[in-house]
Image (spheres, coloured by chain):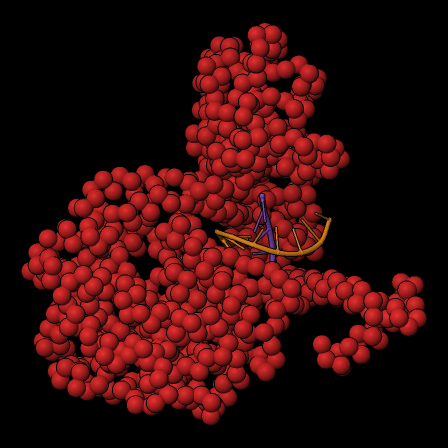
Chain colours: A red, B purple, C orange
DNA sequence: GCGGATCAC
DNA sequence: TATGGTGATCCGC
């Protein structure tokens, strides 16, 4: 803390002291007091910053309201009339589509109330309370009422018990009979937390697992005897005496469900019964805690319920929407209906249609199947963090965590988003989309790092003062994309056209992370340029000279390990492939000529990027200081400094190494960007003077790397040799497929990555189909295995709010992996 | 696609 | 309660 700041603190301390009556200025106590008070002030400041931000946000909402009101004033009576007619027409349609035939139940665990209870009765804390997810109650209880029930988060679920109810009408009494201890049940049905496990006469209940939540082993250990409380004959007799029979109505069924849940979990649940999900959800709120409420399947009953309901109670209507509507004089659902015409003119289509549904009490009558996960993220809040070093470190850590999570679910995404919240609680997100999906720490970090760098640079020389950082990956391939990708790669490889290239990628040195922002247009980031370049090329069709046959041959012979070991999948199949698909952009290529495809892929992989990077590097060069190495190190540089740092040989772009027939003057360049040695990596982000290996646009080259594993195992040393003779330490390898820097200087590792990028799909496919035929089953099944609490759901389809999740099909990817070894592949190709 | 905002749990 | 973490969607560019 510098002196200026300290004096500032002191003066404010005085004010604070006076206010709180602690203005004791006695010498000797100052030190202690100051420390204490600084702390308090910190807290206070924190609070006020938060508050300030809340005010700010509130004002933004106010501005929205103002705009809206202005808009409203401009509405002519004619417009209003027209709107009224249109909306009423819609209302009629909606009314006709009203479906009251379903019985939807919403179950909501009273977790909050359990916590309160625990607080009030600390002795309860001694007793184990079941903690688990609704999806566990899936399996145990809820599925018996609706096999397709939909868990929402950890403590909610929707059930469609329509069919179940019909069936139950004919059930004999003993099928609806449950037992419990008298002393555990009060008159109104409330049980105390000591209630035993549910006991039901039916054999399934008696034989039920002692463990309610398989994912909570501690609970099981703590309660080894919970399966049965029939310790003695006496107990058994007594319990048999205390039975309860539930009726056949929806209300009775839901009572039964809640009873069973409580017996199992020792926690109470509330429930709502209604003809659709929206209403059911609101119903469960009605008699909370430990209660239930039902709206009969009757239009009038629905409308009565809706009538005076504050709009804020409606799922999907939050603080802001409430305020917006309030400004229009709308507090209840019936008012929402009355104002339907102006609303249709003031809100977006989706919004006002949703409002219409709400005001009519309409909602979804079917429980949507779990959708696919759309994103995955991780974020962390902390005390102020303002050094770039810490920030990069944290960023990497987040990437690591995220990568682990992604890989658990076998997900790869194309968009990486960095989220930052500064100490003033202002949130900012920065995203970048890469051409090929990413999932590893290195891949994600490569992108996130740049995004972070951009932000750091943008405020330099001031530090970024962060209180939160998060990383998200989205843009996952959907099932169709995956198939498409696999097919195209399969085709691609079948033609022996796989080229695993090593790119020399000019880029800013890592040292730049901590130095000044670029002098040239600091606002145009690395990514901005990249985007611009990408856009540009998307508009300008790529033009390239024809790839001559020699070049094709070079590429072909240089790489595909499969081709060598497995001639059967060589180019002989190429004739079968009528249309070619680029494995990078997935676009189908009109021409079926390999040359054209190759050209296209080259462009996808390198063209735009390199152009752009050249520009970036050049500007970076302008600001390099004497301590820096030039960011432009011509290939084959003999700079001693660079040489010293070389440990891996990558000979790229030297004319003698480039096939004379290879494309000249093309935009392809393969760059190696500086990376750090393993040891250096520890502090990689702080003080690295890294070097660049840069290929001029005119000195193009193409390097095909042998598949690493293949090389290691076979005789293709020769090819590897050429790279390893001129080691370049501190060079970052950039995967030409995913465009991301690889945190390794080990070519084998790098190659493996590229291999994975390009081949994983096909290898998997091949091993699944041939080596591990059984795999198909596993994969198929694994799709259905969900991850706890992460199942995606849409509670109110009309609002479109979806809660996530997917089951972590750990099984899928993991099991496949076991068969995915190179040994298997080799075996296969033999 | 990006970025900000809103919403839910 | 307030805050934090995760995820989804919408809207305006």
Specify whether A758 is left or right of A553: right
Give residue A117's position: percent from left, percent from top: 71, 34
Give residue A391's position: percent from left, percent from top: 54, 69
Whether residue A15 appears in this view of the structure is no
To which quarter of the image does residue A432 belong?
bottom left
| Residue nearer the viewer, A406 or A82 | A406
Residue displayed at 59% across by 83% down:
A461
| Residue nearer the viewer, A756 or A550 | A756
| Residue nearer the viewer, C10 or A95 | C10
To which quarter of the image does residue A636 belong?
bottom left
Residue displayed at 15% across by 51% down:
A827
| Residue nearer the viewer, A532 or A339 | A532
To which quarter of the image does residue A467 belong?
bottom right
Q: Vertically, is A548 above or below A205? A: below
Q: Vertically, is A802 above or below A208? A: below
Whether residue A560 appears in this view of the structure is yes
């Amino acid at each position: 803390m510098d002196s200026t700041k300290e004096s500032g603190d002191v003066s404010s301390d005085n004010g604070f002291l006076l206010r709180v009556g602690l203005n004791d200025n006695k010498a000797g106590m100052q030190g202690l007091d100051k420390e204490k008070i600084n702390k308090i002030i910190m807290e206070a400041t924190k609070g006020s910053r938060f508050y300030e931000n809340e005010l700010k946000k509130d004002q933004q909402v106010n501005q929205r309201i103002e705009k809206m009101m202005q808009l409203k004033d401009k509405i002519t009576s004619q417009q209003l009339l027209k709107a009224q007619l249109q909306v009423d027409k819609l209302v009629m349609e909606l009314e006709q589509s009203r479906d009251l035939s379903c019985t939807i139940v919403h179950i909501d665990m009273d977790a909050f109330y359990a916590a309160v209870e625990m607080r009030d009765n600390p002795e309860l804390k001694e007793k184990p309370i079941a903690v688990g997810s609704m999806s566990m109650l899936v399996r145990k209880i809820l599925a018996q009422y609706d096999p397709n029930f939909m868990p929402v988060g950890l403590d909610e679920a929707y059930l469609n018990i329509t069919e179940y109810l019909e069936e139950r009408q004919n059930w004999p009494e003993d099928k609806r009979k449950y037992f419990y201890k008298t002393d555990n049940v009060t008159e109104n049905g409330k049980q105390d937390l000591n209630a035993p496990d549910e006991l039901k006469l039916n054999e399934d209940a008696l034989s039920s697992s002692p463990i309610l939540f398989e994912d909570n082993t501690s609970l099981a250990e703590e309660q080894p005897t919970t399966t049965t409380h029939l310790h003695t004959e006496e107990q058994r007799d007594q319990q048999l005496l205390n039975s309860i029979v539930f009726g056949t109505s929806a209300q009775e069924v839901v009572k039964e469900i809640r009873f069973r849940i409580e017996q199992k979990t020792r926690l109470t649940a509330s429930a709502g019964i209604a003809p659709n999900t929206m209403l059911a959800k609101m119903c469960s709120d009605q008699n909370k805690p430990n209660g239930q409420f039902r709206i009969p399947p009757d239009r009038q009953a629905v409308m009565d319920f809706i009538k005076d309901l504050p709009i804020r109670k409606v799922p999907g209507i939050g603080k802001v929407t409430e305020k917006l509507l309030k400004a229009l004089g709308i507090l209840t659902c019936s008012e929402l209906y009355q104002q339907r015409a102006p609303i249709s003119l003031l809100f977006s289509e989706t919004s006002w249609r949703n409002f219409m549904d709400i005001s009519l009490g309409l909602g979804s009558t079917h429980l949507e199947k779990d959708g696919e996960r759309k994103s995955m993220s991780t974020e962390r809040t902390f005390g102020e963090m303002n050094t770039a070093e810490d920030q990069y470190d944290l960023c990497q850590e987040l990437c690591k965590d995220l990568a682990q999570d992604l890989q658990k679910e076998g997900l790869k995404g194309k968009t990486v988003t960095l989220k930052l919240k500064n100490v003033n609680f202002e949130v900012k997100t920065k995203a970048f989309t890469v051409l090929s999906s990413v999932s590893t720490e290195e891949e994600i970090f490569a992108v996130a790092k740049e995004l972070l760098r951009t932000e750091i640079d943008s405020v330099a020389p001031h530090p970024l003062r962060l209180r939160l950082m998060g990383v998200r990956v989205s843009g996952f391939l959907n099932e169709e994309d995956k198939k498409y990708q696999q097919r195209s790669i399969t085709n691609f490889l079948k033609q022996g056209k796989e080229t695993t290239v090593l790119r020399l990628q000019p880029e800013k040195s890592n040292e730049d992370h901590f130095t000044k922002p670029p002098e040239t247009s600091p606002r145009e980031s690395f990514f901005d340029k990249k985007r611009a370049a990408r856009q540009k090329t998307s508009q300008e069709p790529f033009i390239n000279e024809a790839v001559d046959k020699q070049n094709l041959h070079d590429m072909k012979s240089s790489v595909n390990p499969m081709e060598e070991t497995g001639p059967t999948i060589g180019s002989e199949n190429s004739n079968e492939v009528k249309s070619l698909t680029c494995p990078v952009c997935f676009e189908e290529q009109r021409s079926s000529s390999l040359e054209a495809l190759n050209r296209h892929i080259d462009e996808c992989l390198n063209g735009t990027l390199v152009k752009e990077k050249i520009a970036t590097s050049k500007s970076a060069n302008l600001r390099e200081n004497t301590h820096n190495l030039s960011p432009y190190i011509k290939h084959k540089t003999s700079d001693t400094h660079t040489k010293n740092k070389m440990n891996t040989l990558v000979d790229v772009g030297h004319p003698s190494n480039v096939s004379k027939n290879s494309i000249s003057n093309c935009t392809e360049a393969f760059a190696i960007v500086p990376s750090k040695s393993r040891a250096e990596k520890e502090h990689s982000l702080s003080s690295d003077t890294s070097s660049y290996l840069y290929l001029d646009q005119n000195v193009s080259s193409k390097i095909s790397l042998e598949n690493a594993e293949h090389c290691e195992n076979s005789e293709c040393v020769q090819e590897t040799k050429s790279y390893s003779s001129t080691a370049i330490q501190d060079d970052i390898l950039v995967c030409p497929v995913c465009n991301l820097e690889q945190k390794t200087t080990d070519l084998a590792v790098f190659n493996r990555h590229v291999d994975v990028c390009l081949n994983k799909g096909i290898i998997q496919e091949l091993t699944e189909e041939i080596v591990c035929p059984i795999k198909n089953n596993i994969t198929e099944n694994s799709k259905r295995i969900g991850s706890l609490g992460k199942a995606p759901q849409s509670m109110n389809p009309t609002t479109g709010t979806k809660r996530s999740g997917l089951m972590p099909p750990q099984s899928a990817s993991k099991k496949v992996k076991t068969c995915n070894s190179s040994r298997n592949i080799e075996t296969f190709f033999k």
